[in-house]
Structures are given as C-alpha cells and as structure tokens.
Image: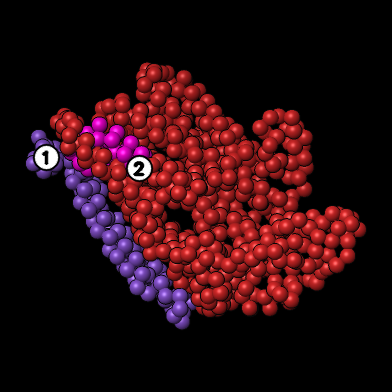
Chain colours: A red, B purple
Amino acid sequence: MPEASNTALMTFAIYTLAVFLLAVLANRASKGKEFVGEYFLGSRSFGVWALALTFAATNASGGSFMGFPALIYTHGWTLALWIAGYIIVPLVSMGLMGKRLNEVARKCDALTIPEVLKGRFESSRVGLVATSLLIFFMFFYLVAQFKAGGKILSTLLANESYFQSAVELVSSATQNIPWVNQAEPDYLVCLLVFSVAVIVYVVYGGFRAVVWTDVMQGIVMFVGVILMLGLALWQVGGLTNATRQLAEMTPPENGIGTVTLSSPATTERSVEKGTWIAQTDGVYRLAAEVTIPAGQVESEPVDILKITTAEEIDRLRREIESSDLRLKIEELTRYKYGAGQKGVYVTNPGPSPTNQLGFLAIGSAISFFIFWPFGAAGQPSNMVRLLSFKDTRTLRYSIVTVGIYYGVIYLALVIIFCCARVLMPGMEIDPDRTMPDFATKLTVDAGVPWLAGVLVAAPFAAVMSSVDSFLLVVSSAVVRDVYQGEINQHASEKRLRLLSHLVTVVVGLLAILFVLNPPTYLQDLIVFATGGLAACFLVPMVLSLYWKKMTGPAAIAGMLGGTMTHLGLTCWGYLKYQEFRAYEFVGLNPFIWDLAGSIIACLVVVWIGPKASRRLVERFF
Amino acid sequence: MPTENTPPSDPLFRSSLRELKWIIVIWLANFIWVIGYCWLFGYSPDQPIALTFGIPSWAFWGIFAPWGLATAVSCWFALTQMRDHPLDLDATDKQTEATDA
C-alpha cells in the first residue's frame, strides 16, 4: 500500500519535527533556571494538562497500542475484564501518594525517587540500594521500549522507497562491523532513527521537553483511538452486529503444511507470508514466507492457520483469487480451550491455544485488578511525575483528566479490536501487526488512506513517550543519586550539565547496542522489570510517607524483600516452565506475593531493628 | 511535639492519610463489584449471549457501568474531598503553626 506508506513517512516527518520544535521551546523556557532541577524535574512547575497527559502517556507504553490490541484480537471480550483494573488507576496511582510524596520531596530537596528515600531517612545506604535496584530493573524496560520503537517504525516505513534505499546503504556500511552486522538492516535503520531522535530531544530539552512531547503524544493517541473507533463501528455495521458475529466465531487451528504446485516450478517461486489458500478441506493462511525451488512442486514445511468459522470461510472463499497453490496438511493443533465452541470470544475466560483453563481464569482476573492500579503506583517513572506538579489543585484536576482519558482510550480499544476480529480474519499469524494493519484497512476501505499515518502514529507516540521518561529516570539516578549524592556533592553547574547530557547519551547508546540483537524473551523482560520495580518501591515508599515507625533499615529490607521474592518466583517459574516467567503460586500474579514479601520484610525489621528517629518524625510528620 | 500517641501536626499528612484510606475503600468497592459480577455472570460460555447497547451484558454491567461510575466517583473525590495545601516550604510551616495554635 504505497499511498498509505507515503503518508506514514510524511506523518512521521511532521511528527518528528514537532517533537524537535517542542524540545527547542523547552530549552528556551529553561534558560536562567538551576540546571539539575530543571533538567530532571522541570523546576516542579507543571500544571494540570502537562501533569495529566505526561502521566497518561508514560503509562500507555507501546504495549497499550501493540500488545493489547493483539490480545483483544486473539482472546475477545475477556480483555475488558483483564484491563478492568484501570478503572481505578488514576485515583490509586496519583491520589495514594501524590500530595505527600511531593511534600516530602520538597522538604528533602529531592529530584529523584532514591533521593526521596535517602532524604526521608537521612541515609546514604537507603539511597544507594534504591538507586542500584532502580537502574537494574529500569534498564530492561528501556531496552524493550527501544526495540518496540524500532519495530513500529519499520512497520510504518516498510514499503517506502527512500527507506529501502537507506536500508541498502546502512546494510553495506555495517556488513563488516561485528555485532552490528547481525541486526536486520531495516530494523537497524529504524532503531537508529528512533533512538537518535529521542536522545537528541531529551538531551536538548530535558524533563520539560519530555513532558511537553508527552502532552502532544497523549493528544495524538487520544485522537487516533477516537477516529479508529468511529471508522471501525461504521464499517462493521454497528456494535450489536459486531458482537453477534463475534458470538458465532470459533478459534482457528494452528498447524504445519507444505505448499504444492500442480506442475514443477519453472523458476524459483516465492509465496508471501499471509497468502490465503482456499481448497475443499478448508481455508488456510501461511504464517511465513516459503519458496518452491525451480523444478520442484513442493516447499519446505511452513506454519499455517486454518479458519474454522463457517461465515468467515464462505466470505474468504468469495474473496480469495483462484491460484495453482495447494496446501498439504501435515499437522493441525486445536486450541486447548474454546476449540469449536461458539460464544467463546464474548465470554470469559476467552479462548487460549496453550492454557486448558482459558485465557483469563478468575484467579488471573483478580490478580490483574490488583496489579494494574498498585503496579502503576509503584513505578518510579510515575512517582517522579508526582514530584513535578506545582500545587495540589494541579494534582486533583489531573486525576479527573487522566480518569476520563483512560476510560475513553481503553474501553474504545476493546471495542475497536473486537470489530477487527470480525472485519480482518487470520491475524493470529502475526498478532502484533493487528494495530497497523487494521488502521490501514479502515482508512483504505473508507477512501481516506492519508489518515493511516495519523492512526499509526498513536503507538509510535506511546513508545516514544515511555522511552524518553525512562531514559531520564536512569540518567537522573546516575547523575543526581550517585555522582552528586555520593562522589562530588559540590560539583559545579557546568560539570553537572555536561555529565547529565553525557550520561543520557551513554545510557541511550548502551540501550541501542544491547537491543541490536534483542533476545527473544524481551517481552518477558518487560513483565519482569515492571513487576520488579513495583515490588521493590511501592511498599517502602508508602510506609515511608505514612508510617512514623518506619526506618531506613526497614526501607532497605522492604526493597530487598520485594526484589528477592520477585527473583525467587522468576527462578521457580523458569525451573518449572523452562520459560522466563515468574511462577504463579496458587494461581495468583507474582506481584501479590512480591508485595507480601516486601511488607513482611519491612514489618520484621521495624519490629526487631532500631527505632525511628524522633527528629525525623518531627521533621516529616 | 508529635509522637506515636499524639495526633500528627502536619495538616497535609493528616489529609493525605485520610484520603489514602478512602481511596483504598473506593478500590475495594470497585473490586467487589467488577470481580463479583463478572465471576457470577461472565463465566458462562454455554449460555446464549445477552447484549446491552451491543456490549455483552456481563461486560456492560460488570465493567463499563462500574468504569463510568468509578470515573465519576474519582472526579467527585478529587474535586470535592481532596484538600488543597500549600506545597512551598514557608507556606507549609505557617499553615502548620496556625493549625497547632
């Protein structure tokens, strides 16, 4: 779809220019202000829209616009229950600690989360433990988001001729560079473009630029979702029609087959990934590209998908152009839950190819209702935003704004991608492409292909707004907590400025190098990092803010207790499943056990350890 | 002088603690409604599907309706129940002295 691709390139170019413009404006606005406070926290001066949209955009990472749509498409309406914990995310993640955290941070003159803990207990040891754990977990998250940025951009630009020329150029330039030459050239180009853009605007504009671009990105996401909702409902013929059709659907079957020809191929014959083949025993889709060598009639075995819904089969038979391709089925595997069962996409627990209990057993639903709000509250990237608002009125109005924003975005996404299931069959072969492909289909079918760029910019904006925030959190931990806090407390402003820029660039470059050849379990690392950060920081921070008996050693114990429980369950899970995922003891999300570990560790040390300093209690309570 | 047995003197701390308790109560009410309703009415794939405004009824009454209500309650709570306090340190000290007096 070259027209849509050109539009995507234009959109990306305009979007990037706007981001740089905001960075320039942010840089101008920061003139004359104390550097470190401005670079890492925007001088604590943000109002309602800035706080609300930076909070919303940072939370809605690439997962919300790539992974979540893929899950809705694959498992149906049960994802509404899966995401239901977001009902209360704004109130819990902002209201639970917002005012108090901001107040304590001001009393300590703290710009980072480790610095708040350090100042609250006047203990360098607490600060160092917090900094170490934050950098450890945050780096995994940063790496994963860089990868997502590169991938989304390569999806956007795949068919663009300028892009293909750049890919060839970079490919030839890097073919002799070890490690770099192992990366796919198109991914490498996109990763470099994405990373350089983010690093440049973060270094140039600091926290203020990050927040201002978050505001723009939040608006792009909101507008993109609303437009998609309207187009999807219009093209599917209304929500009632979509849900009734969805209720008649049955899950597909996954399998392996070989593509065959009636006569030997005269030249090498390539068959594209996603090609449909209709034959008497069913309708199939290829999950990978295959080649039939010249003189042969059969390809190597390839992954396939078999459609099982009668209405979809009839529709596809009418749409698929006849060809000489045939498929020889070698193996077909039914879903472990929901195979051949109508209604499974509109009820819980939702179909699952791998789990006999379905996608969302009630224990998992309970776990996610706890994880979303409290997991969000425990993320340092969210907490640091609560240090930046200028007054408590800003916090109150931001809770209202984010509440409405999330309600619209997430419920709309569920409806949009339930419609996608009806309108666009066979995306199980590559679920992560559901969002960009559906955006393109909606706009092309509606005769407005130029709109695809705006819609696909939404996930790109989501990833960018997360990456910039995490980049700054890691940099601030190194510069403020380690260098200024422990090595050189009287460093000059000029030196801090140079070091802050240098660390941001180095952290970004390290992330790029690490993600050139990303490990296959990167998505699992995101889950590991998110859960680990919340397990590590939530309980110690809440108790530090609200409990007078809380002590520094107890805060360290809480951080280590949560972290060790998290690592322990992850190791247990690895031994049990041979996969990089935490063990779900009695069917509950590991986060709940992590919190329990953290709370117990805090309470034990408060009980048996030294008492809280009366001076600190008087200062902070 | 604040100790464990005397009321705290920082008004922002007091109001934040009160708000924290209410936020936990609001979360718990949502938890009971959403999980309870969906568990009772949303886990029956063999039943014929009932729709409300085109949405499966279990999802409408178990998720969309409480989501709307929770958003309204969040707005009400943030706008009317959360108290404003000065955050700059000089103003905080003055307010604390006034409250203690």
Q: Which residues are magenta?
A: A537-565
Q: Nearer the viewer, residue A240 or A304?
A: A304
Estimate how packed mark 2 is, as few (under 14), some (14 to 19) or many (20 or more) residues with alpha carbons within 10 Å.
many
Residue A267 placement: quadrant? bottom right
Q: Label 1's element?
A: loop
Tell me the subunit letter for badge 1.
B
- The picture places residue B45, in percent across and down from the top left corner, at 45, 75
Q: Quadrant of the N terminus of chain A?
A: bottom right
Q: Which mark is residue B4?
A: 1
Residue A546 on the magenta span: yes
Q: Nearer the viewer, residue A483 or A458?
A: A483
Residue A448 placement: quadrant? bottom right
- The picture places residue A255, in percent across and down from the top left corner, at 65, 63
Name of the residue lying farthest toward the right: A266
Do pointers 1 and 2 mark residues of a single chain?
Answer: no
Residue sitting at x 44%, y 80%: B47
Q: Label 2's element?
A: helix
Q: Which mark is residue A372?
A: none
Q: What is the number of callouts on the image?
A: 2
